Amino acid sequence: MARVIHVFRHPDRFVSGTVGEPGERTFYLQASSESKQVSVTLEKQQLTVLSERLTSLLEEVASRFDTEVPPSAPEELTDTDPLDVPVEEEFRVGTMGLGWDAESSSVVIELLAITEGEVDENIVLDDTEEGPDAVRVFLSPAHARAFAERAERVINAGRKPCPLCDEPLDPEGHICPRQNGFLRDNPFTEG
């Protein structure tokens, strides 16, 4: 079967979002334009890494290519709407690629479907016939900044971290490794 690459050149919308309750959430990336919509699932950690690397890339683009990159997302690009429905998973993300296309002054994000074997990194951001299905999105620096900021909000909207161990707190309780047992008075100290 031939490889399918969904390309979105400056989509109407490219956002992260979740379905489900905190602790049971499924994370999605969703790209849409007038004619199509594609949703892929990924792990929370993958979204965290993508957001961090995207922010770093924007800083590098501003300094190396003398490109105007807004320090924060313009208000008109802030998207707080839920994912568009129906949310139907095209594939689960395995490998992600990130780059800068100087010709179009765009950030390029490529999401490759998870595969059983190793993915040759040469196929990332390439149109070869062989390889996993992919979603490739081109974003202006302002849209990329808006995507990264929304991703941070989505990541932080989950369960609150335990103040002692930073692990997520569950509504039904939390077994904290830092509360292992109980504190005893030391008989060898005064006072």
Image (cartoon, rainbow, N blue to C red):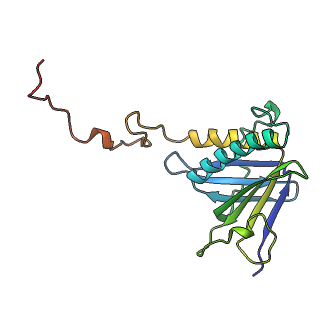
Tell which residue pokes out farthest to the top in this image: 191
**34 on left or right of 18:** right
**91 on left or right of 159:** right
Q: Nearer the viewer, residue 135 or 117?
A: 117
Tell which residue pokes out farthest to the front in this image: 64
In the image, what residue occupies the spot 71% across and 59% down? 97
Query: Where does residue 65 sit, x and y in percent of width and height?
Result: 84, 43
Query: Where does residue 62 sit, x and y in percent of width and height?
Result: 80, 39
Query: Where does residue 76 sit, x and y in percent of width and height?
Result: 82, 33
Tell which residue pokes out farthest to the right in this image: 103
Q: Nearer the viewer, residue 82 or 108?
A: 108
The image quadrant that residue 92 belongs to is bottom right
Asked if residue 133 is positioned above or below residue 75 in the image, the reply reads: below
Tell which residue pokes out farthest to the left in this image: 187
**149 on left or right of 62:** left
Query: Where does residue 10 sit, x and y in percent of width and height?
Result: 86, 50
Image quadrant where one finds the N terminus: bottom right
Q: Nearer the viewer, residue 50 or 86?
A: 50
Q: Nearer the viewer, residue 64 or 72?
A: 64
Q: How many marks?
A: 0
In the image, what residue occupies the spot 45% across and 38% down? 161
Image quadrant where one finds the C terminus: top left
Asked if residue 136 is positioned above or below residue 157 in the image, the reply reads: below
In the image, what residue occupies the spot 59% across and 43% down? 155
